[in-house]
Image: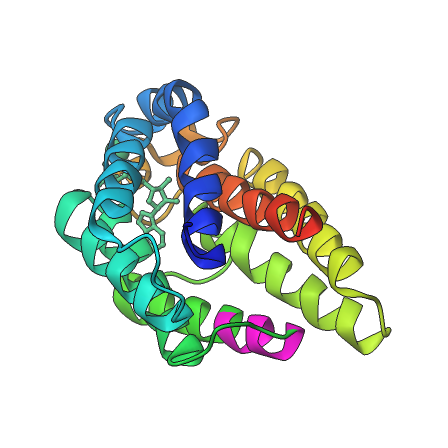
Amino acid sequence: MASVIYQCIEQIGSKIIENKDFLTELDREIGDADHGVNMARGYTEALKAIPQEEEDIGAVLKKTGMTLLSKVGGASGPLYGTAYMKAAKVAAGKKSLTLEDARAMMDEIIAGIQLRGKAVRGEKTMLDALIPASEALTAGMAEGKDVNACLADMCSAAEEGVEYTKTIRATKGRASYLGDRSIGHQDPGATSSLYTLEAIRDFVAGL
Ligand SMILES: Nc1ncnc2c1ncn2[C@@H]1O[C@H](COP(=O)(O)OP(=O)(O)O)[C@@H](O)[C@H]1O
Ligand SMILES: [Mg+2]
């Protein structure tokens, strides 16, 4: 029987793989048309590399991060790889997670991506989904909402962040080569981040 965390990564991978063509299409418009293909390959490889019975959430997240780092090229491989490695540190040795853990993970993930990619909010990257998502999670917790409500708020904020990427110019990554012509296009990395969070929300709701 596959562990709960393995099943969660499987659900994230399935969502990315289902949306592979759309993610690649977004990247065709403002990049080099490889984002969906890259991410789908990364999750396929990660699911092969993770021992299915492993219950240590940190160990599974670390393996996922290492695989994404080594198998996904471009900007997003190292960035998503870093995100999983940072989340793994929070989850090391744990077999279940609390909302507090989730919040700590989001903080680590965002700090890690920012250190690696040197981007801030508003540059049309995955951070424009992740930072509002993290803020919404924190706000939901402060209001005393339950896990499912907090994760739902997190996803709504990420979705708004993805919409916002359509209105701004890219100043980091490949899309920045387009300058003002990147305006009007949805950022692929913000979109894959939204899908990741939505898959987690749906997985947790089904537990
Ligand atoms: N410096 C950065 N910080 C955060 N995210 C970034 C950065 N550069 C690019 N990205 C994200 O990576 C996505 C592109 O990923 P991908 O197409 O896989 O890589 P590449 O641009 O190298 O082909 C962008 O849509 C953006 O969200
Ligand atoms: Mg690309």
Horizontal and vertical percent position of residue 27: 34, 27
Q: Residue at x 20, y 59 (%)?
A: 66
Residue 38 relative to residue 134: left or right: left
Q: Which residues are magenta?
A: 99-105
Residue 15 relative to residue 115: left or right: right
**Which of the pair 16/46 is nearer the observer?**
46
Q: Main secondary structure of the magenta part?
A: helix
Q: Is residue 173 one of those drawn in magenta?
A: no
Q: Residue at x 28, y 66 (%)?
A: 62
Res. 9 visible in picture: yes
Res. 118 visible in picture: no
Q: Residue at x 64, y 41 (%)?
A: 159
Q: Residue furthest left?
A: 70
Q: Residue at x 44, y 24 (%)?
A: 18
Horizontal and vertical percent position of residue 193: 48, 46
Image: 43 above or below 35: below
Residue 158 relative to residue 48: left or right: right
**Which of the pair 18/23 is nearer the observer?**
18
Image quadrant assignment for residue 144: bottom right
Q: Is residue 102 one of those drawn in magenta?
A: yes
Image: 187 above or below 82: above
In the image, ligand 2 is in what quadrant?
A: top left
Horizontal and vertical percent position of residue 147: 74, 63
